[in-house]
Image: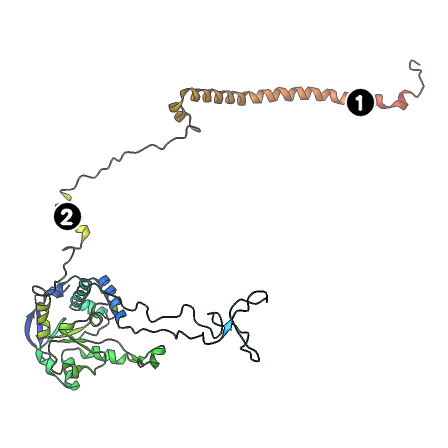
Amino acid sequence: MAARPLVSVFSLAGDKSGETALPEVMTAPMRPDIVQFVHTNMSKNNRQAYSVSPWAGKQVSAHSWGTGRAVARIPRVGGGGTSRSGQGAFGNMCRGGRMFAPTKTWRRWHRKINGAQRRYAVASALAASAVPALVMARGHKVDDVPEIPLVVDDSIESSKKTSAAKDILAAVGALADVEKAGDSKKIRAGKGKARNRRYVLRRGPLVIYKNNDGVERAFRNLPGVELCCVDRLNLLQLAPGGHMGRFCIWSQSAFDSLGEIYGEGGKSVPEDLMANADLARIINSDEVQSVLNPAKRANKKYLRKKNPLTNIKALAKLDPYAAAARESEQRAEAARKDQKAAILAKKRDVAKSKRQYKAKGKAFYEQVSKQGDVCADGFNIGA
């Protein structure tokens, strides 16, 4: 924020002619969020209502054919002898039909704005106009300007010729910003070029005066230059597009009257919620740290809950007998696993002993099965 107690006053020739006190409003807190919000709503208050004709797309006699004819139930143009008959009508999906949700003139075009917010936004925009970094960041050419905020002698209010206005701007180093605005003039993209707003150009300096003794006539024809009376400060001019940092050229009487408009007896100047915005420095200061409780390092750790269905120790806390029974069961199962190898070995030995007699049995069975060979000599077995 601008915190200089005095501001230089320049003559029309560009020489320093005096000093004046910096108004209190120039030290107001800058709130871009409030400025953007108020600017958005203010810019909606100069819109004109528009709508389509209430009869557009409905100026034809049409009715639906109903069901049973294998066509959609959209209303259809009656009659015959022309390609128009039988075509769909009225619907937004139909050729020549009305639009979906036709626009009406009773839309809520305008917005009410809280008065305190509006004043806060104007004060923030004025404070931002006194910060050279914000003015340059907004795109203004102020390299040759001797001081910001730029205050000029009251004789600027009585200038009546545009040539004199150009000489004044050149003397205080503000003509480069006007030339930048003039060089940016181009044809608007879109339909607006056919609606009496054919050209667009960037914003130049804002000349703020107290009494209009011809100053509007002198500066009004310069490209990008706007004029405003200090009694009627407008946020749309102080922060175009919702962006703070407009390059302002003040007359001395207009600059001095800010102290009457804002402050005691006038509009209240917003105050900062925090005198020091460095929160880390505040927290780490000796004043804050000396009254803080010591940090609690040893936090109590809670054990995770165990499932008694899968954890014997948790089960023993609930039912010691069930836990003992489960342990004995597990021991028996472990014993069975240990004896399993011996049992399998014993079974394999029995099977192996049986296999050595199996071949003899097969041979005997084959021998006794040969009936022809056994009875070749009849029943003379003993022969």
Q: Residue at x 21, y 82 (%)?
A: 222
The residue where tag 2 is placed is 285
Quadrant, the N terminus: bottom left
Q: Position of residue 319 (x, y in %)?
A: 40, 22
In the drawing, does residue 277 fall left or right of residue 105?
A: left
Q: Which label lies toward us, 1 or 2? A: 2
Secondary structure of residue under mark 2: loop
Left or right of 281 on screen, residue 309 = right
The residue carrying mark 1 is 363
Dot 1 and dot 2 residues touching (CB under 8 Å): no
Q: Secondary structure at mark 1?
A: helix
Query: Residue shown at 23%/68% (left/top)?
Result: 137
Q: Say which amino acid is labelled 1.
A: Ala
x and y percent of residue 225 in the render? 20, 78
Task: Please tell me in which quadrant of the rendered image residue 14 appears.
Answer: bottom left
Q: Is 254 situated left or right of 374 in this image?
A: left
Q: Which of the colour schemes (rainbow, by chain, secondary structure, one colour) is used?
A: rainbow
The residue under the point 19% across, 52% down is 279
Q: CA distance from mark 1 to mark 2?
A: 107 Å
- Mark 2: which amino acid? Ser
Percent position of residue 276, x then y: 15, 55
Tell me which residue sits at (21%, 74%) in the image.
141
